[in-house]
Amino acid sequence: MTEFSAAGQALGVKPIPKLVRSDEDWRRLLPPLAFEVTRHAGTERAFTGPGWDNHADGLYRCVCCGTALFDSRTKYDSGTGWPSFYRPIAASNVRETRDGSLFAVRTAVSCVLCDAHLGHVFGDGPRPTGLRYCMNAVALKFVPRA
């Protein structure tokens, strides 16, 4: 996992043990919708998540463990109603897996440290990557750049 400062500067790759908690512990720590989305691969309704349309400068961190996931400089308005980014802040901070639910094959995105479900990545994004990391706003915690 790559750690990042509050200014968004990479501090280096560090081996950090996976964060494991019981459902009971996560339920106590998270609001109900964030628990359902992050721990049970739920999805919030479009245009309803906190800060889905935030345009401030900063980092988006995992709501469960604080891992840096996305930089606001890669965020764009996809028109979907969910925060969308064209790349993660570091490939080492997210995990992509095959998701065959909902009668379609998609690529799910989760936090590498705590396994929180974040959303999905699609191949219809803007340059330079052509990717759209479509994330649930309740899975992310925005921290203004220091």
Image (cartoon, rainbow, N blue to C red):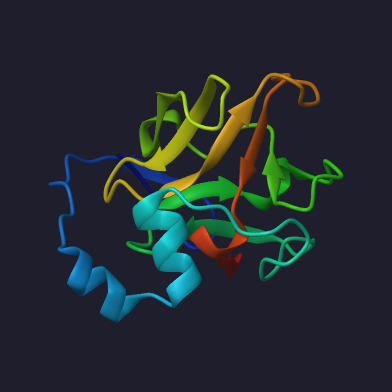
Q: Quadrant of the C terminus?
A: bottom right
Which of 110 and 9 lies nearest the eye of the viewer? Answer: 110
Counting from the top left corner in percent of width and height, residue 68 is at 44, 52
User: In the rendered picture of this protein, how many numbered marks are placed on residues?
Assistant: 0
Residue at 53%, 19% in the rendered image: 105
Residue at 47%, 36% in the rendered image: 109
Q: Can residue 146 be seen here?
A: no
- Left or right of 112, for residue 8: right
Q: Is residue 12 above or below residue 131?
A: below
- Left or right of 2, for residue 131: right
Counting from the top left corner in percent of width and height, residue 135 is at 60, 47
Q: Is residue 107 above or below residue 119?
A: above
Q: Quadrant of residue 56?
A: bottom right
Residue at 30%, 46% in the rendered image: 115
Counting from the top left corner in percent of width and height, residue 86 is at 68, 32
Which of 62 and 121 lies nearest the eye of the viewer? Answer: 121
Q: Quadrant of the N terminus?
A: top left
Q: Residue furthest front?
A: 103
Q: Can residue 40 be seen here?
A: yes
Counting from the top left corner in percent of width and height, residue 18 is at 16, 47
Q: Is residue 92 above or below residue 83?
A: above
